[in-house]
Amino acid sequence: RTTKTRSSVCDDAGAATRHPMTDPRAFLADVAKALEDNAFGVAGAVRSQEGGAVFVDKSEVPRPRLVPHAELARLAAAHAAAPDAAAKNALVECACRAYVGGAADVPNEWEAAKTRLLPQLWPLEKVKAKQATLPPGVVLPHCGLHGEADASVY
């Protein structure tokens, strides 16, 4: 269901989870070439790493971003399933803009960020697992569907 428009190719990357694991090397090679050539006004680099791939911009203070293995697998599958070079190129552009150009970053200021944040439904086990990774005294904000808190998380 991959189409040629940039936004739909980005959105359809999730649909690629229906495909078996695809070797990400072709996708990463296309991304590396685009970043090296500054093809989309975004310069940087990408390298494979255990657990995924690291995308890095070429700013004075580089901001490396790890793209986890599962996400990399979805992107590689969408890239492999793309019907033509234009669709592949659109997916590569989305990855470059999101992971190197910062298009996927949430702004630090509340007014700028609030339109990009959406509520998420997590099972209690996931909330507890995330809370367990946080330093003592740092609390993951959450509530039940009816606004109740669960003290067992802390």
Image (tube, helix red, strand yellow):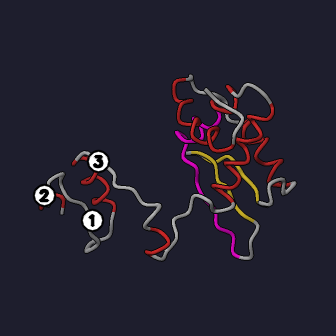
Query: What is the C-alpha distance between the residues marked 1 and 2?
Result: 14 Å
Percent across and percent down for residue 6 are 68, 43
Q: Which residue is mark 1?
A: 141
The residue segment tinted magenta is: 61-76
Q: Secondary structure at mark 1?
A: loop
Which residue is painted at 63% across and 48% down in the image?
Answer: 53
The residue type indicated by label 1 comes to Pro
**Residue neighbourhood size for the residue with mark 1, other residues' Cα within 10 Å, grouped as few (<14), some (14–19), many (≥20):** few
Which of these two is toward me, 152 or 96? 96
Which residue is painted at 76% across and 46% down in the image?
Answer: 31
In the drawing, does residue 2 fall left or right of residue 39? left
Q: Which residue is mark 3?
A: 122
Q: Which residue is mark 2?
A: 152
Query: Is residue 141 a member of the stretch shown in magenta?
Result: no
Percent across and percent down for residue 136 are 27, 72
Percent across and percent down for residue 16 are 57, 29
Image quadrant occupied by the C terminus: bottom left
Q: Earlier in the sequence, mark 3 or mark 1?
A: 3
Which residue is painted at 18% across and 58% down in the image?
Answer: 153
